[in-house]
Amino acid sequence: MSGKKNKKNINIVYSTNPNFKYETDENETENTLPPQQQDLRIFLDRLGGGKLVSRVNGFIGTVSDIEALGKLLKQKCGGGGSVKEGNILIQGDHRDKLLKILADLGYKAKKAGG
């Protein structure tokens, strides 16, 4: 995907030092916030062919946690979808269902967009 940036090499363009190593913060791990502290937004978008997709963004946490939440939401809505770049995408207009499901799980969520 061309939209992704390699975060560990973001400030280095070129180095002539053959022993140069990039400095990374490997100790820095992104912890998942508890549901009460998450501030999620639910959008309705249209993809390439005009198909509707419900998008949930604002989740702060690890990749495995957002994938688990995405899987649960897809099962509860009875539709397909995916998790891409920190967004949970559910095929179709399921904003009301998603809002109720997330509220039952303890997340702070609200509809956003037009």
Image (cartoon, helix red, strand yellow):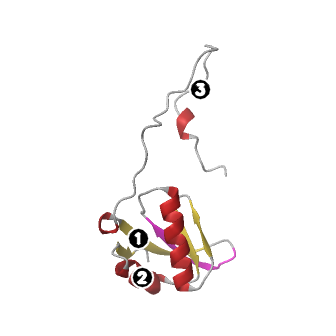
Q: Residue at x 33, y 63 (%)?
A: 34
Q: Residue at x 64, y 14 (%)?
A: 18
Is residue 89 found inside the magenta-colored segment of the image?
A: no
- 71 on left or right of 103: right
Measured Cα–Cα span from mark 3 to mark 1: 36 Å
Residue 59 horizontal/vertical position (percent):
42, 63
Q: Nearer the viewer, mark 3 or mark 2?
A: 2
Comparing 23 with 1, the one in front is 23
Q: What is the CA distance from the residue labelled 3 to the residue labelled 2?
A: 46 Å
User: Contact, CB < 8 Å: mark 3 with mark 2?
Assistant: no
**Element assignment for label 3:** loop
Kind of residue at disc 1: Arg
Q: Residue at x 53, y 71 (%)?
A: 70
| Quarter that holds the C terminus | bottom left
Task: Give SS at disc 1.
Answer: strand
- Measured as percent of width and height from the top left, residue 87 is found at 52, 64
First-in-chain label (3 vs 2)? 3
Tell me whether the residue at label 1 lies in contact with that at label 2, contact meaning CB atoms closer than 8 angstroms: no
User: What is the secondary structure assignment of the residue under circle 2?
Assistant: helix
* Mark 3 or mark 1: whose residue is earlier in sequence: 3
**Of helix, strand and loop, which mostly describes the magenta segment?**
strand
Any mark on residue 101, and which?
2
Residue 32 appears in which quarter of the rendering? Answer: bottom left
* Residue 8 on image: x %, y %: 54, 36
- For marks 1 and 2 on the same chain, the one whose residue lies earlier in the sequence: 1
Q: Which residue is mark 1?
A: 41
Q: Furthest-right residue in view? A: 49
Foreground mark, 1 or 2, reads: 2
Question: Residue 89: which numbered mark, if any?
Answer: none
Give whichever of 77, 55 is nearer the camera: 77
Q: Which residue is mark 3?
A: 13
Q: In this picture, which residue range is highlighted in magenta? A: 49-57
